[in-house]
Amino acid sequence: MRMQSTIESTLTSRAITSPIGLLTVLSVSPLDEDHVSLQTIIGHSTWTIFQAHDLVSAVALLRQQDIAVVICERDLQSATWIDLLEQINTLANAPSLIVTSRRADERLWAEALNLGAWDVLVKPFDRLELIRSVKSAWDHWHKQTHTPVGKSMAAAC
């Protein structure tokens, strides 16, 4: 599995939407080491990994690809994870957002989870924790986006 840059993913001949069951991850960080670390941990899997270095390229990819999980550095260049979350919330099949930071304290945890992020991970990544979090976030996304209307309506009653 190789990581695709923003330009490569735009030029790729892949279908715009991914098949049901395919786990797609978008890594959003201005730091190349974050993308490399993620690639090192989950690059051996069948998961498709995209990368973006800023909010603008992340939003462009989210509008082009059916992304299930976004892993976003707390601080982006001229934006934050909150700005990305606001953009994610406008999407029909909004992906689950995992926030990352070297300074992941209780305040960030509380803020992220209260605003709608799926999880918060401390960097450097712990391999097992990252895999657990991504799988859990994908499962949540998949249930939200692939639940038939009849089932969701029955569950609401």
Image: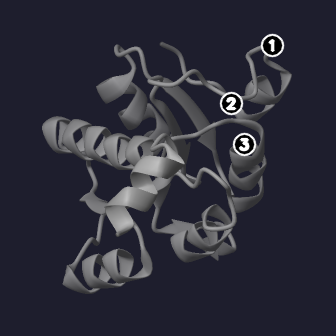
Residue drawn at 47 percent across, 60 percent down: 73
Q: Residues within 10 Å of mark 1 (few under 14, many from 20)?
A: few
Amino acid on which the number 2 mark rests in the picture: Ser
Residue drawn at 48 percent across, 38 percent down: 35
Q: Is 99 rendered above or below residue 63? A: below
Give the labeled residue for mark 1. 13
**Residue closest to the eye, 114 or 31:** 114
Distance from disc 1 to disc 2, alpha carbons, whole Å, reads 14 Å
Task: Mark 3 or mark 1: name the one nearer the start of the chain.
Answer: 1
Q: Which mark is residue 5?
A: 2
C-beta proximity under 8 Å, tags 1 and 2: no
| Label 3 residue SS | helix
Q: Is 134 rendered above or below residue 105? A: above
**Residue 128 placed where, x, y %?**
14, 36
Amino acid on which the number 3 mark rests in the picture: Leu
Task: Mark 1 or mark 2: name the one nearer the start of the chain.
Answer: 2
Give the labeled residue for mark 3. 61
C-beta proximity under 8 Å, tags 3 and 2: no
**Residue 157 placed where, x, y %?**
35, 69
Q: How many numbered marks does the figure carry?
A: 3
